Image (spheres, grey):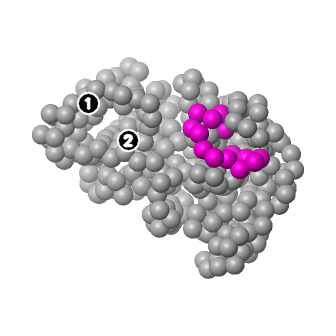
Amino acid sequence: MKAAFITEPGPANSIEIGELPDPTPSNGQVVIRVYASAINPIDTYIRSGTIAMDLPQPFVPGCDAAGVVESVGPGVKRLAIGDRVWCTNQGLLGRQGTLSELIAVDEGWTFKLPEPVPYEDAAACALVGVTAHLGLFREAQLSPGESILVIGGSGGVGSMVVQMAAAKGARVITTAGSESKAQMCRDLGADEVILYKTESIEERTKALAPDGVNVFWETRREPDFEMAVDLMAERGRMVLMAGRDAKPAFPVGPFYVKECSLHGFVMFKATPMEMKNAAEEISQWLAAGKLSANISARFDLDDAAKAHELQESATLDDSSHLAGKIIVKLNS
């Protein structure tokens, strides 16, 4: 099979394209013929060695994929040959990734894909969708009628948060850096958009939600706890999913007096059942048109290194050239 892989951590141009042996499903695994994979920031961190993990040799990067079940191993119960499926949580903790024509994946990380949903959309919504779902409903327990402020509603995770919160009947306030991105957020279901380059997030949020927001979703690498606690309502919940090296000041007094709570989490530590619960609702929303993929760029497998370079420019250099997910097309 054709695959993108590395033999040791390094820059994007260390990614090689070549032939690797076809995978054989182990107990409880399925082999998927991949039609679309997605690039995530964590893929670049692992490929570069920024996040150190034990890697198979050679190592195929990538967390997300969508395709068709080609074969099944012993012990597989839910899936059958020919099923349309999507998966995430690959390329992590010693598992091989998804930038190859065939991948072997544990059934517990693999979910059925309804017939109307394109493979590209499923791959684009995989990791970011599960992340948004876990943060909103397992952690923050967002309820209909509540309000949420999403920092960065046009980004990969942010666009999922906006759509899911709107689908649950919450009032969604988000931020965007341009009018075009603001319109994108409105199209995704945001009720109000703050243009943070020309408007004060604090002032606009207080005008839009005088009693505070029930949920504050932070996507920036440097969380602003002072602002978040000030803008949250009594018993407000802050969701934190970025800022691995950040050490900002924290307003302890106002935080506990308001009875707020802080929820930090990483998607890949979710249990298979937690991920399955999220995935089933994501698949339903995709099929019903309540959730749409935010795809910004597409590459062929031969250009996997370029896809990684674009992702790095967006996450490390704050590039404005990316306003959504990067898809790698396979088996076309």
* Whether residue 81 is situated above or below residue 212 in the rendered picture: below
In this view of the protein, which residue sits in the foreground, 188 or 110?
Answer: 110
Q: Amino acid at mark 1?
A: Phe
In this view of the protein, which residue sits in the foreground, 78 or 115?
Answer: 78
Give the prevailing secondary structure in the magenta stretch: loop
**Residue shown at the point (24%, 46%) measured from the top left:** 261
Labels 1 and 2: the sequence-earlier one: 2
Q: Position of residue 107 (x, y in %)?
A: 62, 69
Instruction: Report whether 43 appears left or right of 276.
Output: right
- Quadrant location, the C terminus: bottom right
Q: Name the residue at the front extreme.
A: 54
Q: Quadrant of residue 144?
A: bottom left
Q: Secondary structure at mark 1?
A: loop
- Quadrant location, the N terminus: bottom right
- Regarding residue 148, the answer to whether it shows in the image is no
Residue under pointer 1: 250
Task: In the rendered structure, find residue 240 and report the number of the disc placed on it.
Answer: 2
Q: Which residues are magenta?
A: 47-61
**Residue shown at the point (37%, 52%) measured from the top left:** 136
